[in-house]
Amino acid sequence: MRFLFYDSITRIEKGKDVTGIKTFSLSEEFLRGHFTKEALVPGVIFIEAMAQLLGWLVIYTHDFTLSPILTLVEGAHVPSRLRPGFKAEIYGQITSTSKRDTLGAAAMFIDGEKVASANRIIYSHFDKIDPGELYRRFCYYSGLKEQIPWISQTKKG
């Protein structure tokens, strides 16, 4: 079972921002047995979706040479009662990044209306041993039909 809480990446710009899509359906695994009378999307799923998408932007920004570990989420706002059956657009942006850590923010929109946000997301970084494998995972998990150029690939010759 894969625990990705976004369906695809629709746009990504190195060092700046990323946009993705998530369709929340009634068949989501996290809804199974969670609520007894009415299926509601748990707020933590909104935070995880935003953090996962922003995490891939961090990886892409650093040419697949490191992996981010979520260390802090502040100023998070999530809906209290949102039923499945909607498509959301997720937007994340990097505020600052270095070899050691990244600061960013993210938001989720339904039909142009903001329904969730995290004003401050911090990731610590650790070196990734196999950047090629991380790049392949990115291409697979992003849902992009064409592979995104990877600067380090051209350095290999």
Image (cartoon, rainbow, N blue to C red):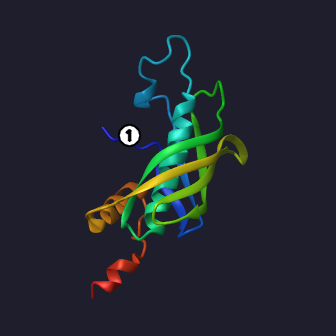
Quarter of the figure that contains the N terminus: top left
Quarter of the figure that contains the C terminus: bottom left
User: Looking at the picture, which amino acid does disc 1 mark?
Assistant: Phe
On the rendered structure, is 7 left or right of 134? right
Number of marks in the rendered image? 1
Q: Measuring from the top left, give residue 89's x and y in whole percent.
A: 60, 49
Q: Is residue 91 above or below residue 149?
A: above
Q: Residue at x 63, y 28 (%)?
A: 82
Residue 66 vs residue 137, the one in the foreground: 66
Q: Measuring from the top left, give residue 44's x and y in whole percent.
A: 53, 32
Q: Residue at x 54, y 27 (%)?
A: 42
Q: Residue at x 64, y 24 (%)?
A: 81
Residue 79 vs residue 111, the one in the foreground: 79
Residue 6 vs residue 54, the one in the foreground: 54
Q: Measuring from the top left, give residue 87's x and y in whole percent.
A: 58, 43
Residue 8, visible in the rendered structure? yes
Q: Measuring from the top left, give residue 137's x and y in whole percent.
A: 32, 58
Residue 22, visible in the rendered structure? no
Q: Which residue is mark 1?
A: 3
Q: Is residue 130 above or below residue 52?
A: below
Where, by quadrant of the figure, is residue 151 drawn? bottom left
Spot the residue most to the front: 100
Q: Secondary structure at mark 1?
A: loop
Q: Is residue 61 above or below residue 90?
A: below
Instruction: Give the class, few, some or many, for how many residues have Cα within 10 Å of label 1's Cα (few <14, many ≥20).
Output: few
